Image (cartoon, coloured by chain):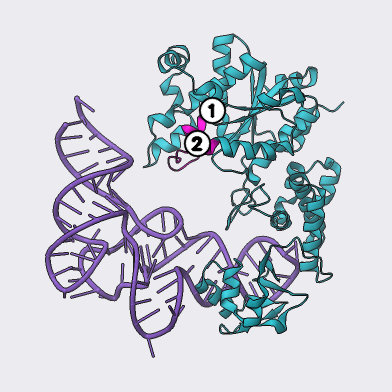
Chain colours: A cyan, B purple
Amino acid sequence: MNNVFDTLKERGFVQQCTHEENVAQLLAEKQITYYVGFDPTAESLHAGSLVPLMAMAHLQRAGHQPIAIIGGGTTMIGDPSDKTEMRQLLPREQIAANGASILEQLQRYVKLDTPTTHANNAGGLFLDNAEWLLPLNYIDFLRDIGRHFRVNEMIRAEAYRQRLDREEGLSFLEFNYQLLQAYDFLHLYQQYGCALQLGGDDQWSNILAGVSLVRRLEGERVHALTFPLLTTASGAKMGKTADGAVWLDANKTSPYEFYQYWINTDDRDVEQFLAYFTFLPMDEVQRLGGLEHAAIREAKAVLAYEATKLAHGKAAADKAQAASRAAFGGSGQELEAMPTSTLPTERIHAGIPIMELFHEVGLASSRSEARRLIQQGGAYIHEKQYRTINTVVDATLLENNALRLRAGKKRYHRVVFE
RNA sequence: GGGGGCGUGCUUGAGUGGUCAAAAAGGGCAGACUGUAAAUCUGUUGGCAAUGCCUACGGUGGUUCAAAUCCAUCCGCCCCCA
């Protein structure tokens, strides 16, 4: 039987780990409970959260019990690690609403119950740490938990270090983040026997704080495992594009755009991404990753399809793939999955100035940008370039009552008139 | 509590009364070359009814023909001393 730890390691999920042999052994010998925290500051997770999600999924497949924590309590503080400035504090209702939609996204990767749907017995749990953090009493907390933390130790941690060195400084509020995260681990250990916390490598010191808190108070050894922080080969943060994050919410990033994000992966990242973001067996991952030159596009197509299937389901992945092939392969007309807007027919009969059209459908964020796009030769309708800014688009250009616009090489948009 | 300093566009960061929609770099976008990749080169990068107008250098008010630049005040932040 293949040990999950080996699987995680082989696929590149392990950056740092407390006592590797112990963790490997623990995971092999019995079913354990593990947890990962998610940040509810946005209403959706983005591609950057996929590493923890996939790791959780691998562990659950191996029979271990996941707990996903939504940081409803800790978010009220703001994690200082890797943030250049203090995070904006969100109202509680907002955080709760975000948590609810994040749960839906988590469900696509791991099976979870909430405290209220406990009966489902999905084998995993979804909790909000506000539940135990908010009722805490300050004095009690300081006496019971705070006493175990040494400030001189804390400020040596990289996470605080950076903030201390920078001009922005660090507020006392944020300084407490680590204590609360450590307390989460303690709480989960006490309530659910949770023995392992996973997180991004920037969480290492926070996780260790929890490990040592449990050891001091409970005399028990629990474990920490961190994932490497992903940047693409070109140095960009994983899951971010110029337009912002790549979201898992189909309303914020359509499956087509999601698919396109992956297919545009840098050659150098393909193999690693296949290992992280798909469940394909490693020999297949290596085969695809080994493809060279133009052939590596096949690997990117597999990556894009598999990743989209996990996030949005097979039907959406099929559609995205078809639309992508139609747009870039030059064949077929299966374009429904492409970003589409609808305009009233009268508009096209009246004639729409081209600048207005590109701006209105979102291919240009202002009319000036549309103007630039057109002047620089980046505006296409049905693959025909238009360079004159006072062009008026009328009904003679319609194909099946629709226009296919293109901005630059890769951004497509369909406009349907009805 | 005392003293010193800072706040500029997506980011870093110059600018200390007009020549400033604001240097430079990074990032972004477009074009060329390509494989929907990378690298490279070129152009471009506040908005608009566009040889002009509007908005913008933390907020507000003021001085001036003219303010990112000077003054007052407020807000936020940093450093040193207590």
Q: Do circles 1 and 2 both sit on a common chain? A: yes
CB-based contact (under 8 Å), mark 1 and mark 2 = yes
- Residue under circle 1? A205
Question: Nearest the camera: B73 or A17?
Answer: B73
Is disc 2 surrounded by few (<14), some (14 to 19) or many (20+) residues within 10 Å?
Answer: many
- Residue under circle 2? A81
Secondary element at tag 2:
loop
Numbered range of the magenta stretch = A74-95
In the image, is residue B69 above or below residue B1? below
Residue B52, quarter of picture: bottom left
Residue type of the residue flagged with mark 1: Ser
Question: Nearest the camera: A89 or B24?
Answer: A89
User: Quarter holding the C terminus of chain A?
Assistant: bottom right
Secondary element at tag 1:
helix
Residue type of the residue flagged with mark 2: Ser
Q: Residue at x 44, y 34 (%)?
A: A161
Question: Nearest the camera: A97 or A46?
Answer: A97
- Residue A280 at x, y = what percent? 83, 43
Mark pair 1, 2: CA separation: 10 Å
Is residue A314 left or right of A22 when viewed as pictured? right
User: Quarter holding the N terminus of chain A?
Assistant: top right
- Residue A305 at x, y = what percent? 79, 52
Q: Earlier in the sequence, mark 1 or mark 2?
A: 2
